[in-house]
Each structure stands twice: as C-alpha cells, then as structure tokens.
Amino acid sequence: MLVLFISVVLLFIGVCFLSWRIKCLSDRISMFESSLDTQTDSMLGPHLKLKILDPLRLAQQESRLAKAVGTVSPSYINSKVYQQVAQELEVAMKERNIDVSIELFGLKGSSSTNN
C-alpha cells in the first residue's frame, strides 16, 4: 500500500513538473512570436494591414449560400472572403495603373495566397 501511495505522489509531482514546463515553454513561444511580429513590421517599411471585421456578414451580403456554409465552416468562409477581397483590390489597383503586392497570411481552411 505504501508503494502505491509513493508511486501516486511521484506521478503527481511528475505531472505538475511537466505542466509547469509546458506553461513556461508556451510563454516563451508567445514572447518570441510577438518579437517576430514587431521585427517583421519594422523591416517591411510602410505597408497596410487590412482586417475585415465581419467576414461572415460580408459573405452573406454577396451570396445566399454563404449563410448555410458559414454555420458549418466559418473558417472556410473567412478564407474565401479574404481571397475575394484581395483579388478585387488587386484588380482595382491594376485598373488605376498602380503596382501592388497583395499577400494573405494566417488563413485557416485554405492555403495562404500570395498575389
């Protein structure tokens, strides 16, 4: 009985230690990610950052099917909305003879697109 108790205590200590290490590593990863974002932004020079505040509502305005698909797969709708907006922005800029580079990052549900 004593051996079982000692085993359980050691197992508990091991789990606590691993949980603590995972928390520390998670904090370090977050710190590195934020420092990478800051470094990347300063290295890019002037640029625009676009965030669509309600992509599902925008998709619903443009397509009746978006409402049904959006309830099942909102990440898919988000990625399609961003891809469509990027494409329309690129076309509008080319019509005005403005050379632009539009890149999409962090899309879930499809691969990132570089235009």
Image: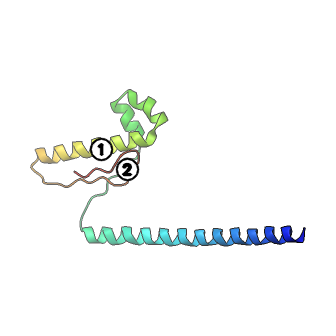
Image location of residue 8, percent across then percent down: 80, 67
Residue 42 horizontal/vertical position (percent): 30, 71
Q: Which residue is mark 2?
A: 107
Q: Is residue 55 visible?
A: no
For the point 48% across and 35% down, the residue is 72
> From the viewer's perspective, is 1 left or right of 96?
right
Type of the residue with mark 2: Leu
Could you give the CA–CA distance between mark 1 and mark 2, rounded to whole angstroms? Answer: 9 Å
Q: Residue at x 26, y 46 (%)?
A: 86
Residue beneath the point at 41% across and 48% down: 108
Res 83 label: 1
Q: Which mark is residue 33?
A: none
Instruction: Give the class, few, some or many, for how many residues have Cα within 10 Å of label 2's Cα (few <14, many ≥20).
Output: some
Q: Position of residue 13 (x, y in %)?
A: 73, 72
- Vertically, is 81 above or below 114? above
83 to the left or right of 93: right
x%, y% of residue 43? 27, 71
The answer to whether residue 59 shows anywhere in this view is yes
Q: Is residue 23 left or right of residue 49?
A: right
**Residue type at the position of mark 1:** Gln
Q: By what rule are the colours in the image chosen?
A: rainbow
Q: Nearer the viewer, residue 103 or 92?
A: 103
Q: Is residue 93 left or right of residue 33?
A: left
Residue that extends furthest to the right in the rendered view of this protein: 1
Q: Judging from the image, what secondary structure is the residue with disc 2 in? A: loop
- The image quadrant where one finds the N terminus is bottom right
Q: Using the rendered view, name the quadrant where residue 47 is placed.
A: bottom left
Marks 1 and 2 close (CB-CB < 8 Å) = yes
Q: Residue furthest top?
A: 64
Say few, some or many: other residues with alpha carbon within 10 Å of mark 1 (under 14 / 14 to 19 / 20 or more).
many
> Mark 1 falls on what kind of element?
helix
